[in-house]
Amino acid sequence: MKSYPRSDRISARIREEISNVLTREIKDPRLNNITVTSVKMNTNLKQARIYYCLLGDEAQKKDAANGLKSALGFIKREMARRLGLRYMPDIKFIFDESFDYSSKIDKLFNTLNKNEHEE
């Protein structure tokens, strides 16, 4: 059986717990439709980059980023309480652009298919 690095195990727990905190604990409407896509930890477990996505326009994405910034203290306290780590990593939220990119590519393919069927 393959063993996983500790950073991967902690990343998975952080992803699960942050998703729970965002959906169940925080009542900020700016954070309603956020999905945590992945968590990347550095090897010494001092920093966590949390990637999230959101379906919406640029204004909604900016509001969500501001909402995450204002809720960061609460999120860190909740994570420290739930995870029981000796040191809580610094958290940085990063918008995951891959979903927007894949959506644009999908639209292009649909347009191409539509044009082929018309010809």
Image (cartoon, helix red, strand yellow):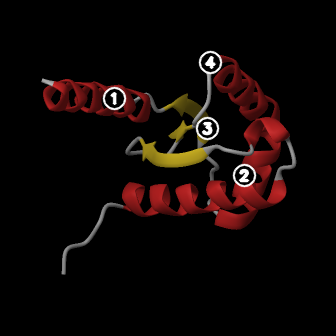
Compared with residue 97, is residue 52 higher up or lower down, i.e. above or below? below
Q: Earlier in the sequence, mark 3 or mark 2?
A: 2
- x, y percent for residue 118: 19, 26
Label 2 Cα crowd, 10 Å radius (few <14 / some 14-19 / many 20+): many
Q: Quadrant of residue 109?
A: top left
Residue 107: give its label.
1
Q: Circle 3 sits in a helix, a strand or a loop, which is it?
A: strand
Q: Earlier in the sequence, mark 1 or mark 4?
A: 4
Q: Earlier in the sequence, mark 2 or mark 4?
A: 2
For badge 3, the amino acid type reads: Ile
Q: Mark 2 against mark 4, which lies toward the viewer?
A: 4
Compared with residue 90, is residue 76 higher up or lower down, i.e. above or below? below
Q: Quadrant of residue 104?
A: top left
Using the rendered image of the protein, determine whether residue 59 is visible from the camera's viewpoint.
yes
Q: Which residue is mark 4?
A: 58
The quadrant of the picture occupied by the C terminus is top left
Determine the CA span between mark 2 and mark 1: 30 Å
Q: Which residue is mark 3?
A: 91
Q: Earlier in the sequence, mark 2 or mark 1?
A: 2
Pointers 2 and 4 in contact (C-beta within 8 Å) = no
Determine the CA span between mark 1 and mark 4: 18 Å
For badge 2, the amino acid type reads: Leu
Q: Circle 4 sits in a helix, a strand or a loop, which is it?
A: helix
Q: Which residue is mark 2?
A: 22
Q: Circle 1 sits in a helix, a strand or a loop, which is it?
A: helix
